[in-house]
Each structure stands twice: as structure tokens, then as C-alpha cells.
Amino acid sequence: MQPTLPPYARLLGIDFASHDDGEQGPPLLVMPFSGNVLGRPGFLHGGAIAGLLEMAAIVALLEAATGNPSIGRVKPINMTTDFMRGGRDTPTFARGIVGRLGNRVANVDAIAWQDDRDRPIARAHMNFLLVPNTPA
Amino acid sequence: MPKDPQIETKPATTGFDAERFFRRMGSIGHGQALAMEWRRQGADWVELALPWRADLVGDEEAGLMASGPIFAMMDNATSLATWRRMGAFRPSATLDFRIDYIRPAKSGRAVIGRGECYQVTRSIAFVRGIAYEEKSDDPIAHVAGTFIFTGPVWRG
């Protein structure tokens, strides 16, 4: 199941990307280079990269939580982002990896890359509070 | 974090005018897309504001602004604060940035970001900041980060 992306993701131009043949795993997101995500001339804004990583972490978590009726909403507690390379004028991909999905907290990593998946431009670690569904 | 910052309308103690720089750089790219606004500056801090907009929402159910726009504003406010502290522009790149969400932002409210640079070494600037709505002693988020300089100070 693909969750609907929120308005902020649409502002950044983020969309779901198709997996490589036969590949499994959490949803892959893509953010095209555009004026809306530009920082200093020719480079992505760090805030736009962080926004993409946040979305990748959230969709990975929502997918992992699918089918778990006790999880209602997920609330971000914090986010730590490392910037490893400048983002150039080419599409950026991102994927979240759920490290642990507990009862109260989820620990999720996200990684962003451009031409080469083995040369990430940024990575993030997020902790989420899992809000239980209140029984009707 | 200054407890009770003196409002300075002019850069009295530093040769770097963050307002002028912001008005030039804020009008392009991601800053323009977010419609960030200038507020005020001090010797080592800068305040920007992010008016609430429906297309900045990250949590539709709760009507909450996504953290990306707040992140972008704090990144800009803390970079400007670094050049305020140094008194000059120096090219830099964000090395790492952390945000702690103290409490949810209220839907429909502008978020103010105050960035402060508390230490500069030969290679690294250390920054911190808060995002709040009305009172700086009731923040919605704390940030901490570092910038690495990528070139020499621009003189003149």
C-alpha cells in the first residue's frame, strides 16, 4: 500500500519511484531538481533534502505499521541529519529503513542519493512516538 | 540562547548585514518557495519567520506544518547567525543538523526561528536555535548543528 503524500511533499515535487526489477523493500521516493528546492545556485537546499528524508522515513514507517491495528498516528520526536555531499541539479532518491518498530517508539533511518546509491548525499535518523489507536 | 535579546535594527557590532543578505538570497529557490520572512538580528543571532500555509502541511490529519520547512528556516537562520558572529560572509556547508520537537506546532500559526552561532573555529561553526510561535520561552523545537567552511572569508 502506498500512503498519500502530504501537501509539503507535493510542494517539493516528491513522488513514488518504481523499484528496480525484482527489488523488494520500503517505498522509494524521488524529488526532481526544481526552483522550489534550490539553495545556493546549482545546489539543493539542505532543508529540501531534509524534507525528502523525513518523507522517506515516514512512508517506510507507515508501510511497516500497515496491518498493525494498535498503531494510530506517528509523531516525530527528533531528527538528526548528516549532509555528506552537495546535492546537484539532478533527481534525488530517498528510502527509509525501519530499524525497530516497538510498541511506543520507532527508530527509522533514511538515506538520500542522486546518480549512485553507494554515494549518498545525506542521511537521517528519526525517532517516532507511536500513538495507539483508541478502541472505538 | 539570549534570554532577552536586544532588538537591533542596524548591524552595530558586525560588518555583516544579515537582513540585506537575506533579502537578496531569500528571494530565490527554496526560501522563495517557503515565503520565509525577515524579523531581526543581533550580534550572533538572527530571527526569521515562516508564515503558515496549507501547502507546508506534513500531517494532514492534525493540520501540522511538516518539519522540512522549519528545518530549512533554522538552517538559514543559523547560517546567517554564523556570518553575524564572524562579521563577514564565509562559504559553508551544513555538516549535520538535529531537531528535537518539544511540542506540536499549532495549526494556522506562523513559526518564528531564532538561530544563534555560539562558537566558530578555523573549520567549523557551532550553532543552535529554537523555533516558537509567540514566546521564545515556549518553543516548539530546539535545533543544534554544525557548518563546515568551504572557502575563505569574503572581504570587502
Image (cartoon, coloured by chain):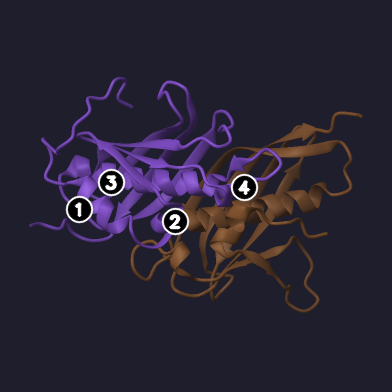
Chain colours: A brown, B purple
Question: Which residue has dot 1 on it?
Answer: B89
Disc 1, SS: loop
Q: Is residue B111 left or right of residue A72?
A: left
Mark 3 near mark 4, Cβ–Cβ under 8 Å?
no
- The chain containing the residue under callout 2 comes to A
Residue drawn at the location 73% of the way across and 73% of the way down: A19
Mark 3 near mark 2, Cβ–Cβ under 8 Å?
no
Residue B58 has which mark?
Answer: 4
Foreground: disc 4 or disc 2: 4
Horizontal and vertical percent position of residue A85: 43, 64
**Disc 3 or 4, which lies upstream in sequence?**
4
Question: Which residue has dot 3 on it?
Answer: B80
Horizontal and vertical percent position of residue B44: 23, 36
Question: Which residue has dot 2 on it?
Answer: A46
Disc 1 to disc 3, how far (Cα)? 9 Å
Residue sitting at the far left? B156
Amino acid bearing label 2:
Gly
Disc 4 to disc 2, how far (Cα)? 17 Å
**Disc 1 or 3, which lies upstream in sequence?**
3
Residue drawn at the location 38% of the way across and 53% of the way down: B94
Horizontal and vertical percent position of residue A136: 92, 29
Disc 2 to disc 1, how far (Cα)? 18 Å
Disc 3, SS: helix
Amino acid bearing label 4:
Gly
